[in-house]
Amino acid sequence: MLDREYFLDYFDAAKLKEKKCLRNYKNRRMVFLEEIDGEKYYIKKYVPHRQRKRAIAFGLKKDRAEHYKFISEKLDEIGIPHIKPELVIVNRKSFFERESILVTKDGGMPLEEISNFDQKRKLIEKFFDYFIIMCKNGIYPTDYNFGGALVEGENLYLIDFDPYRTKFFITKKFKQYMIYKLERRMYLDTKKEKRFEDFLRDQVQRVCRELDWN
């Protein structure tokens, strides 16, 4: 059981400077690494700004850390393996001002780092299977990419699903947007060998067939 009090340091500007920061996106989304009792933990800190800050204050949107927990519960319901939140803390400074942290345990090697095509092929098929299952259950991964999955042995776990969305109904325009984003993230961002590109295109086409998004 993680000590909640220990992680309150992430809301202290002076103590935050002493933490090991892996990524910092304009001080709005920061990722830190800590080792506790021999286990690696990743700490995401979210600081909403402008429209998102107001939308969260008025209850129109969830805080990103709380949304991660919400999506985790939805993924549990449909049996999608994922990295569950170990701890979520929201620090409300005022009606509009807030910040939050999400703590998750290390879950394996990023899918994008596996170079063996035959091993990667099976995992990527599973990766697209997860996408199809989620969409059929009203969960829409709007930023679905190999960096959002971890591999441990034969198992594949989703991570970084705080931008996922839930909807009861989607329009044709939203379906087209989802496929565009999927194609863009899958095989247009970086140069890949031809057989890999062909395989990824086949997988995107499979998604369109199984979801009837043609």
Image (cartoon, rainbow, N blue to C red):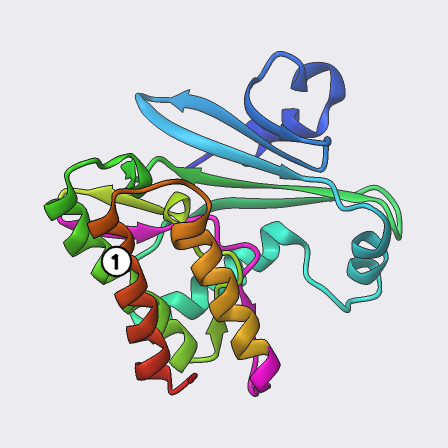
Residue 135 placement: quadrant: bottom left
Looking at the image, which residue is at 77% across and 59% down? 56
- Residue 90: give x, y in percent of width and height: 68, 46
Q: Is residue 108 left or right of residue 44?
A: left
Secondary-structure class at tag 1:
helix
Q: Is residue 2 above or below residue 55?
A: above
Q: Which residue is mark 1?
A: 198
- Badge 1 density bin: few <14, some 14–19, many ≥20, Cα 10 Å: few
Q: Is residue 31 above or below residue 166?
A: above
User: For the view shown, which residue lies furthest in the top direction?
Assistant: 18
- Residue 188: give x, y in percent of width and height: 44, 50
The quadrant of the picture occupied by the N terminus is: top left
Looking at the image, which residue is at 78% across and 55% down? 52
Is residue 3 visible in the rendered structure shown here?
no
- Is residue 157 on the magenta stretch? yes
Looking at the image, which residue is at 36% across and 47% down? 146
- Residue 76: give x, y in percent of width and height: 36, 66
- Residue 100: give x, y in percent of width and height: 67, 42
User: For the view shown, which residue lies furthest in the right direction?
Assistant: 95
Q: Nearer the viewer, residue 6 or 53?
A: 53
- Is residue 149 on the magenta stretch? no
Which residue range is magenta in the image?
Answer: 154-173
Residue 80 placement: quadrant: bottom left
The quadrant of the picture occupied by the C terminus is: bottom left
Q: Amino acid at mark 1?
A: Asp
